[in-house]
Structure formats: structure tokens, C-alpha cells
Image (tube, grey):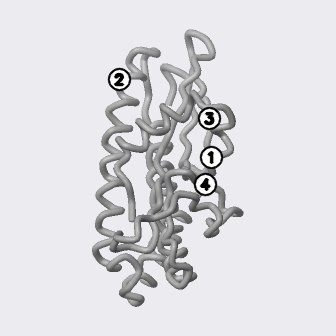
């Protein structure tokens, strides 16, 4: 299950003022899969699902000089906001793999955003910022829609045939965008 990115952003902003907030974040990596220990928030006993992934696309923009900017696009999982059932019998591998799928979908869309940014050209920092925020909002909305579709078509992992199709599709798409897995890169204005 996914959570609204607006909620994530608000909570992440609040958490940014807490010491050790970085210990709460997992940046997506092909070598680091989620475990049940990563889901730190207890799920309400009345919740219809067994777990809830709270992840989203974050960014950093650091101007280098008048000609370039360092951009970071990250898929982040928030441990303290991601929940799991108190009933340990619900904490099975199939559900964990489904939740990993949510994290992976966000990474796919982070790669799409990186590609869009790197394939475009910009006159200066102001024009870059305008284009960046348009692209970010569009990709973020598309990622949320894709996660909704993922939950609906897999029935939150219950439909194993559809879950297997989605897992294969997500892996194929991550591979197709492998050239955009680098989280940080430099954009030079006036060049493509």
C-alpha cells in the first residue's frame, strides 16, 4: 500500500528537524532489499492491509556556478512512517515483495525524471528551476497513479499471477532505465 507523497513531504519536513533523521531513511539500492525490520510503525489492528510502504522521490539542487547545477534525485523509504501488522502471521515474504514493488516503482519514476532532466537543455538556473518543478510534479503524479494501479491489479499481492507479472514488468523497466540509476549528476546550462 502507498501513502500520499504530500503526507510524506510534510512528515519528511518535520523529521528534517529531528536529530538522526537520516537513520530513518533508506535510499533505494539494487543491493539493499527491504526487510520487515525496516517497517517500524505498527499498523492499526483495524487496517485492511498487512503493511504500508511510505516512500517517494526526493531531490537536491545545488548550483555550482552560473553555468551548472548539481542535481540529486533519490527514491527514499521512510522507516518510521512505513507500517506492518502486529500479527506476525501476516508478515510473509509475498507481502514484503509486494511492498518492495512500491519502493521499486518509485525508483523507476526517479530514473524517468533523471532521464528527462538530462535529455533537456536549459538557458540558465531560473529556466532550469521552472522546468524542473514541472517535470517533478508530472513524474510524481505518474508514480502515484502507477502505484494505485499496482495495488488494484495485484489486489495488494493477493492475486499472485498479477503480482508475478508486475514484478517482472518492474524489473524489466528498471533495467530499461539502468543508464539513469546514478542519483547525482551535473547539468550544464546551454548544453544538451
Residue 67, visible in the rendered structure? yes
Q: Are marks 3 and 4 in contact (CB under 8 Å)?
A: no
Chain-order first, disc 3 or disc 4? 4
The local crowd at label 3, few if under 14, some if 14 to 19, many if 20 or more residues have their Cα within 10 Å, is some
Give residue 99's position: percent from left, percent from top.
Answer: 49, 68
On the image, which quarter does residue 159 sit in?
bottom left
Disc on res. 24: 1
Horizontal relation, residue 67 to residue 105: left or right = right
Chain-order first, disc 3 or disc 1? 1
Chain-order first, disc 2 or disc 3? 2
What residue is drawn where x is 50% and y is 39%?
A: 58
Dot in front, 1 or 2: 1
Which residue is the extreme one toward the bottom?
161
Give residue 92's position: percent from left, percent from top.
Answer: 55, 82
Disc on res. 185: 3
Query: Which residue, given by chain and number where applicable, does mark 2 sit on?
Result: 130
Observer-nearest residue: 141 or 117? 141
Dot in front, 3 or 4: 4
Q: Is residue 94 above or below residue 72?
A: below
User: Separation of disc 1 and disc 2 at Cα?
Assistant: 30 Å
User: Separation of disc 2 and disc 3 at Cα?
Assistant: 18 Å
Residue 172, visible in the rendered structure? no
Chain-order first, disc 2 or disc 4? 4
Amino acid at each position: 500500500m502507498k501513502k500520499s507523497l504530500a503526507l510524506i513531504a510534510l512528515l519528511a519536513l518535520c523529521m528534517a528537524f529531528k536529530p538522526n533523521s537520516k537513520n530513518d531513511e533508506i535510499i533505494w539500492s539494487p543491493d539493499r532489499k527491504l526487510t520487515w525490520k525496516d517497517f517500524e510503525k505498527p499498523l492499526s489492528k483495524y487496517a485492511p492491509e498487512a503493511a504500508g510502504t511510505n516512500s517517494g522521490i526526493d531531490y537536491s539542487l545545488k548550483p555550482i556556478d552560473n553555468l551548472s547545477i548539481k542535481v540529486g534525485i533519490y527514491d527514499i523509504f521512510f522507516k518510521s512512517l512505513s507500517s506492518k501488522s502486529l500479527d506476525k502471521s501476516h508478515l510473509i515474504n509475498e507481502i514484503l515483495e509486494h511492498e518492495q514493488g512500491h519502493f521499486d516503482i518509485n525508483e523507476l519514476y526517479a530514473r524517468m525524471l533523471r532521464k528527462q532532466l538530462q535529455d533537456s537543455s536549459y538557458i540558465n538556473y531560473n529556466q532550469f528551476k521552472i522546468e524542473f518543478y514541472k517535470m517533478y510534479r508530472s513524474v510524481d503524479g505518474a508514480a502515484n497513479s502507477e502505484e494505485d494501479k499496482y495495488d488494484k491489479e495485484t489486489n495488494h499481492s493477493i492475486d499472485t499471477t498479477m503480482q508475478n507479472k508486475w514484478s517482472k514488468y518492474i524489473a524489466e523497466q528498471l533495467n530499461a532505465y539502468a543508464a539513469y540509476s546514478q542519483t547525482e549528476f551535473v547539468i550544464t546550462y546551454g548544453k544538451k
